Image: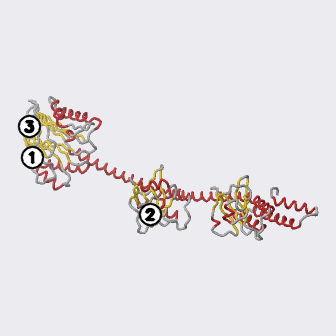
């Protein structure tokens, strides 16, 4: 009993009674208080809940001191005190919270705002090991008399008796709360694990969004929600459920949302957003809460949620669940996009492979032997599949058709167009004069290709008997002719590109090649090749290469031209396909 003031009073009263000058009423009062303390101690040690302990302590005091009202305020982790038990105090005051008093010992009216707010006369701290756990407060006595020192001593005794079980009860409540949180966390983790498996097994964006928003609505017990994803320069509306006809904006600029999202740490009310289209739209859709989905400090999107049907506020665990689910959703959606890109890349690779096979099949495997002439040709693609084409066509009487073309576009469509040109020339070559041959080919391409597809083409028929070359240039780079005496010429006769104008005419040109003459038919990948300083290779450099290789064979001249272009472009590399056909008239 040491430390209980009421017990000391009772012991002193008994001693006085034994000496024969005792006040019988004081003895009876002390005995009543002692019995109340013993009953309270029995109740407190019975293992009751924290609420029952607080009620018992409060009722003991109210009964012994005849107070009209009483409260027991418990101190929380945030330093505020809140009412946990009350008698005679009208609602809604019991839901209020107060700053803990800074004074020590029993407080009277005027010492703390708590007494004035609750209509109390005294407030006694409940202390354990130097830490104030709670406060026991009493209102006016029923008979209107003030509280005596003896009454306050009894109040302190009750507070001392109640301190250990209150501390134990608070610890128990805290452990129970921790257990509830752990159970909720385990439940959430199981849900997230199950959802993760479902999300990773799907490659349909709409299915993923439906699963995510359905899970969100079921877990948070909200009737509507929407998902926004981060896109370039802002956020795009991705999916919604439960909006019943209302539609959020399809896009929101980043500068209208990012400042607000940066200040939101958890689930925040939508009215925290700046005034603008998004906030107005969310309010019209009755979406009252916003949850940013962030990684690495940068928002990747956000959820907009409706009100909870239960009215229960969102907890930290709710926020963590939403954040984790949002990250899983964005990760799953990104996986779907990457899968789609991978499928598209595989499709493009298959197309490129087809185009490469088509292109290889069209180019001649061997260079024909033409009496009195040395021929060489090669096509080098700048990218995986080029749009250039060359060919040698046997025409009879020892003549050979020389073809070099540049097809618009790249990839499979260009290869298919090239195949059409190749097949047409194989079928038509030698059946008509070059001018008529080009007119027929042009009409065929105009009827059978898209309006924006065309071909530049040089076609010449070389006769080894007399060295004559009859040609048509259909919009192609005019070939370069260097005579053995150093004279330069360009083969320009012809017309426009093939495949655009159905009625186009293609006049023929003719030159005679003499021993030592060299002709270079090239695509614009040679003449328009650019240096690191953005200068074109041009006609003059090409003529210079031909003149420098005057005494060499066609293959050596071709290699010299390719080497000169490569050295000129340097680190800049090629910007277009390079195809060249070299014809040299052999010296007699």
Q: Is residue 24 above or below residue 428?
A: below
Mark positioned earlier in the residue sequence (3 or 1): 1
Find disc 2 in the rendering and name its residue.
282
Q: Which image quarter is the C terminus in? A: top left
Confirm or deny contact between disc 3 and disc 1 (CB under 8 A).
no
Q: Circle 3 — which element?
A: loop
Find disc 1 in the rendering and name its residue.
434
Q: Nearer the viewer, mark 3 or mark 2?
A: 2
Marks 1/2: CA–CA distance: 71 Å
Find disc 3 in the rendering and name its residue.
464
Q: Which numbered dot is residue 498?
A: none
The residue carrying pointer 2 sits among few (fewer than 14), some (14 to 19) or many (20 or more) residues within 10 Å by Cα, namely: many
**Residue 327 can be seen, yes or no:** no
Marks 3/2: CA–CA distance: 83 Å
Nearest the eye: 82 or 466:
82
Q: Residue at the left extreme?
A: 466
Q: Residue at the front extreme?
A: 110
The residue carrying pointer 1 sits among few (fewer than 14), some (14 to 19) or many (20 or more) residues within 10 Å by Cα, namely: many
Confirm or deny contact between disc 3 and disc 2 (CB under 8 A).
no
Marks 3/1: CA–CA distance: 17 Å
Q: Is residue 200 above or below residue 282?
A: above
Nearest the eye: 216 or 207:
216
* Horizontal and vertical percent position of residue 81: 66, 59
């Amino acid at each position: 009993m040491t430390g209980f003031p009421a017990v000391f009073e009772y012991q002193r009263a008994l001693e006085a009674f034994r000496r024969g000058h005792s006040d019988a009423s004081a003895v009876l009062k002390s005995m009543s208080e002692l019995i109340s303390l013993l009953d309270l101690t029995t109740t407190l040690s019975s293992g009751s809940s924290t609420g029952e302990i607080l009620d018992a302590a409060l009722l003991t005091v109210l009964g012994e001191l005849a107070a009209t009202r009483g409260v027991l305020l418990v101190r929380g982790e945030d330093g505020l005190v809140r009412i946990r038990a009350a008698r005679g105090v009208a609602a809604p005051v019991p839901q209020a919270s107060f700053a803990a008093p800074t004074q020590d010992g029993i407080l009277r009216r005027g010492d703390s705002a708590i007494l004035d707010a609750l209509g109390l006369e005294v407030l006694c701290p409940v202390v354990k090991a130097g830490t104030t756990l709670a406060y026991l407060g009493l209102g006016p006595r029923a008979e209107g008399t003030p509280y005596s020192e003896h009454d306050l001593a009894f109040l302190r005794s009750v507070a001392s008796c109640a301190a250990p079980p209150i501390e134990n009860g608070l610890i128990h409540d805290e452990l129970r709360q921790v257990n509830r949180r752990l159970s909720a966390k385990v439940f959430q983790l199981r849900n997230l694990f199950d959802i993760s498996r479902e999300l990773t097994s799907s490659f349909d964006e709409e299915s993923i969004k439906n699963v995510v928003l359905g899970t969100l609505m079921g877990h948070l017990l909200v009737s509507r929600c929407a998902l926004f994803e981060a896109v370039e320069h802002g956020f795009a509306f991705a999916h919604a459920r439960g909006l019943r006809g209302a539609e959020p904006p399809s896009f929101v600029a980043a500068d209208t949302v990012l400042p607000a999202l940066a200040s939101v740490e958890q689930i925040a009310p939508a009215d925290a957003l700046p005034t603008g289209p998004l906030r107005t739209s969310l309010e019209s859709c009755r979406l009252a809460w916003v949850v940013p989905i962030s990684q690495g400090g940068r928002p990747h999107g956000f959820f907009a949620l409706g009100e909870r049907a239960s009215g229960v506020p969102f907890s930290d665990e709710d926020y963590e669940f939403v954040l984790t689910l949002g990250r899983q959703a964005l990760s799953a959606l990104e996986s779907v996009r990457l899968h789609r890109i991978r499928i598209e890349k595989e499709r493009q690779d298959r197309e490129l492979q087809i185009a490469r096979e088509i292109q290889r099949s069209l180019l001649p495997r061997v260079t024909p032997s033409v009496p009195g002439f040395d021929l060489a040709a090669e096509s080098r693609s700048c990218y995986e599949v080029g749009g250039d084409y060359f060919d040698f066509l046997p025409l009879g009487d020892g003549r050979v058709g020389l073809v070099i073309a540049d097809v618009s576009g790249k990839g499979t469509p260009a290869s298919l167009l090239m195949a059409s040109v190749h097949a047409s020339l194989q079928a038509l070559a030698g059946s008509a004069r070059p001018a008529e041959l080009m007119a027929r080919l042009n009409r065929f391409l105009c009827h059978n290709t898209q309006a924006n597809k065309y071909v530049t083409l040089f076609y010449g028929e070389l006769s080894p008997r007399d060295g004559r070359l009859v040609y048509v240039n259909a919009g192609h780079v005019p070939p370069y002719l260097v005579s053995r005496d150093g004279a330069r010429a360009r083969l320009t006769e012809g017309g426009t590109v093939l495949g655009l104008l159905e009625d186009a005419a293609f006049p023929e040109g003719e030159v005679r090649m003499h021993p030592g003459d060299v002709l270079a038919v090239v695509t614009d990948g040679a003449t328009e090749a650019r240096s690191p300083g953005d200068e074109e290779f041009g006609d003059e450099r090409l003529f210079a290469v031909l003149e420098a290789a005057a005494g060499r064979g066609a293959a050596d001249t071709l290699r010299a031209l390719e080497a000169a272009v490569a050295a000129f472009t340097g680190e800049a590399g090629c910007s277009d396909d390079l195809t060249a056909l070299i014809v040299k008239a052999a010296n007699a």
